Structure formats: C-alpha cells, structure tokens
Image: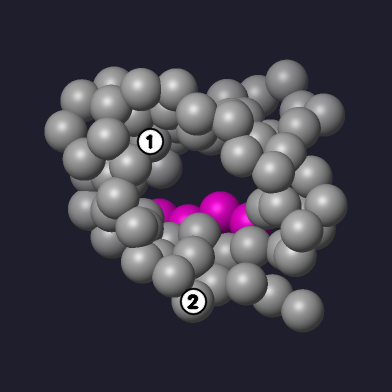
Amino acid sequence: KTLGLIYPGKFHFGTDKAEYMEIVAGSCSVKLDGQAAVNSYGAGESFHVPAKSVFDIAVGSGICEYICSFLS
C-alpha cells in the first residue's frame, strides 16, 4: 500500500499491477484507458485500475488524499 497526495492539475499514470484506489479526502476525476467516461470520486469512494493500463486523474482544487493498494 502507498499513501499519497495529488495537488491540483492533470496527471497521466501507468500501472504494472492492478490497483485499488481509496479516496480519503478531497476529490478527483478519473478516466481509465479505453473508456470514454470520466468519473468523479470523493472522500469515502474508491475505484479499480486494471493491471498494465494507464489512467488520467485530475484534481480541480485542494488536495486529493488517497490510499493505493496494489493487487496481485
């Protein structure tokens, strides 16, 4: 597991292993590779990222705090 902060901006990440992202505070918008939909997540919500994929995450304001669990 990792704990992290995402400051305002737009970011592009790649994954090796599948990830389970839990939003602890703040909010973000996420677009998974190959999907047209952009989903918003706030504190208490979570999303999955498939292994060997990429995703875009954006934070409009404030700081988004998360816990990332790497799945095998």
Q: Amino acid at mark 2?
A: Lys
Which residue appears at 21% of the width and 40% of the height? 63
Disc 1 is placed on an element classified as strand
For residue 10, side relative to residue 3 (left or right): right
Q: Tell me the magenta residue range.
A: 44-48
Q: Mark 1 vs mark 2: which is more N-terminal?
A: 2
Q: Which residue is mark 1?
A: 28
Q: Amino acid at mark 1?
A: Cys
Q: Which residue is mark 2?
A: 1
Q: Is residue 62 above or below residue 47?
A: above
Disc 2 is placed on an element classified as loop
Crowding at mark 2 (Cα within 10 Å: few <14, some 14-19, many 20+): few
x and y percent of residue 35 in the render? Answer: 76, 28
Which residue appears at 64% of the width and 63% of the height? 19
Q: Is residue 63 above or below residue 29?
A: below
Q: Is residue 41 above or below residue 44?
A: above
- Examine the structure image and report whether residue 51 is included in the region drawn in magenta: no
Main secondary-structure element of the magenta-colored stretch? strand
